Amino acid sequence: MVKNPYFKQNKGKLPNDPPNYLGKVARAVWVKIVPFLEHTEKVQRIDSMLVELYCTTYEVYRLSYQDVKENGIQQAITKPIQAQGSGEILGEQFLGFKKNPAVATMKDAVDTLNKVAIQLGLTPKGRQELLAIVDEDKDDKSAGDALKDFFGGAE
């Protein structure tokens, strides 16, 4: 039995069930957005990797955000103060603050989410662009139809 190519499997539609290897948050996002994407009829099975990227990036965003909630947007930098002779730690010297690395991870995730969301039509701008493409496709005529119109009464 010959197996259909990937893009034709599931009648070319995205699977409703998320891949098993996705994390808990990514799986929940998949379940939320796939019905919407299927309803728009603008996304096909071959786009599942883009959907996967969106879902996993959202999970990275949420994990980063959780870290920022727990540890703050910046963290104190300290240096231990030791006794010269014994090496005993007497206290800490405050040196300032550094940005929590999770803040940069969040920013990168938001940038990626925005780019992928537009491609999938998950933002107002993305939906508008997809509608414009559909409208252009409706207006496009085949070369044969255009020639028939041009020579209108020549039949």
Image (spheres, helix red, strand yellow):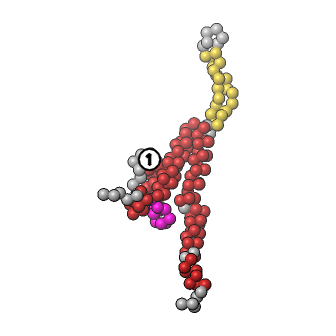
Q: Position of residue 102 (x, y in %)?
A: 58, 40
x and y percentages locating residue 47 in the rendered image: 48, 57
**At label 1, which amino acid type do we have?**
Leu
Q: Furthest-right residue in view? A: 95
Was residue 37 drawn as part of the magenta stretch in this picture?
Answer: yes
Quadrant location, the N terminus: bottom left
Q: Quadrant of residue 103?
A: top right
On screen, residue 18 versus residue 146, left or right, reads left
Q: Can residue 141 be seen by looking at this rendering?
A: no
Q: Main secondary structure of the magenta part?
A: helix
Q: Is residue 72 left or right of residue 42?
A: right
Q: Is residue 154 above or below residue 13?
A: below
Q: Is residue 50 left or right of residue 12?
A: right
Residue 144 in percent (x, y) is at 54, 79
Kind of element beneath mark 1: loop
Q: Nearer the viewer, residue 95 or 142?
A: 142
Q: As rendered, which of 73 and 127 lies closer to the eye? A: 127
Query: Does the image show residue 98?
Result: yes
Instruction: Name the residue furthest top.
Output: 85
State the residue at coordinates (45%, 63%). Answer: 38
Span of residues in magenta: 34-45
The picture places residue 16, in percent across and down from the top left corner, at 40, 57
Quadrant where the C terminus is found in the figure? bottom right
| Magenta residue check for 33 | no
- Which residue lies most toward the front here? 154
Q: Residue at x 61, y 42 (%)?
A: 104
According to the image, label 1 marks what residue? 22
Where is 115 relative to 105, above or below?
below
* Dot 1 alpha-carbon crowd within 10 angstroms: few under 14, some 14 to 19, many 20 or more: some
Name the residue at 59% across, 54% down. 115
For image coordinates 48% across by 53% down, the residue present is 49
